[in-house]
Image (spheres, grey):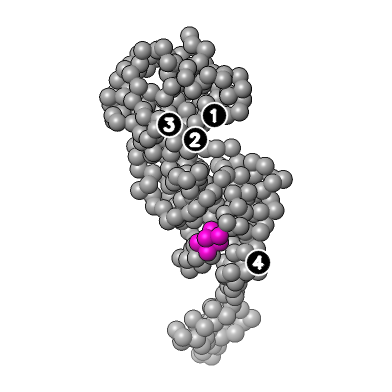
Amino acid sequence: MTLAAPVKWAVISILVLSLAGCSQPGGKANVPSPTLSDAEASSTVVAITSTPSPTPIPQGSDGNPIVMGIVWSDESSQSAAAGQFIQYLADTTGFVFALQPFGSKLDLLTAMDQGKVAFSWLLPEDYLYASENNIGIVAFQTSHYGVYSYGSYVFVRSDSGFQLDFDPDTGMSKFGASAALRQFSQKIPCLVNQRSISGYAYPLGLLAEEGVEVKDPVLLQTHEAVIRAINTGGICDFGFTYGITGDPRTSSAIQKDIPDVMQKVLIAWQTPADIPTLNLTYATLLAGDIRYAVSSALKKYASNPDGLQTLSMMNNYAIDGIRPASDDDYENLRAALRAAGIDTQSLLSR
């Protein structure tokens, strides 16, 4: 019995050591593992998890051209001129350019907002939408038949009894909007259509600004149709068309059908020239060095008749000069549309 106790404790000790060794995988003893320093751990993580970032392709180089967006109104006559202009910009600036046609101005402006289009030529209604949505900023205004902005004419029949405030010799009106438009309160206007800036939106804005309430307008779709309706009589009491850049009474069709139109349909008033002409607008996201390069090239291009002719053909819009422009040039038009409660998106050209 005296030998039994030591043997018993020896067995217990062996079991304890065996269990301790089994606490590690493979039956190894519980030996502390070596640790990495913070620097070593950091470098190890980077080596395992990071991947090289692709080098961005600079805008204006192969694979990332500077895109001019355009909506064709007559592709057959515009495309060759557009190609000439794009090639000139490339030759002059050293950047790579591309031309991208779109099916509508809304599609074009959406692409400009996404950074896919660098610049485009926009009508005033298109620019108002671009400005309102922080898509683009105007850079240049074009001279169209000698003017950089235009307005609307108010036409009446010669026997209507309305007061006339327009001097055909000077092409000027003496009175402001309030005095000129009050006489049309509760009368029926003839307007063009809901997308016409000079034959619908701006006139309604002026009437709203002056608090002149009129009856529901008759929409006739074209400026010449407004002249025909005024001449016929009984359709509306007065009508709005474009003004200052030209006179719809002088169209060949009107002159043929109504030889005495200049005596029968008279200008009662001419609005201020608050509607800017076609402009060049840069995308808000476009880099400053590219804007400068394009602007410098454009000014040189537009300084000669051949360049102006190409710009006119490219835009299907008569251009006889350009000048710098700013967003302030649109403030009066913007205020008129706001007074009429007209949504700029509803005015977007095709």
**Distance (Cα) linking label 3 and label 4:** 46 Å
Report which residue position mark 3 lands on.
152
Q: Earlier in the sequence, mark 3 or mark 4?
A: 4
2 vs 4, front mark = 2
Q: Secondary structure at mark 1?
A: helix
Does any portion of residue 164 appear in the rendered image? Answer: yes
41 to 306, vertically: above or below: below
The answer to which of 199 and 129 lies nearer the viewer is 199
Residue 235: percent from the left, percent from the top? 49, 11
For mark 2, what is the residue?
Answer: 246
Residue in the image at 61% along x and 28% along y: 252
Select label 3 or label 2 by which is in front: 2
On screen, 270 above or below 46? above
The residue that disc 4 covers is 63
Three-letter code for the amino acid on which mark 4 is drawn: Gly
Q: Are marks 1 and 2 in contact (CB under 8 Å)?
A: yes
Nearer-N-terminus badge (3/2): 3
Q: Which mark is residue 139?
A: none
Q: Based on the picture, tell me whether residue 8 belongs to the magenta stretch.
A: no
Q: Secondary structure at mark 4?
A: loop
- Residue type at mark 2? Gly
Q: Which of the two discs, 2 and 4, labels the residue nearer the N terminus? A: 4
Crowdedness of circle 1 by 10 Å Cα count: few (<14), some, many (20+)? some
Work out whether mark 1 precedes mark 3 in sequence or the reverse, and give the earlier one. 3
Which quadrant holds residue 106?
A: top right
**Residue 11 visible in rendering:** no
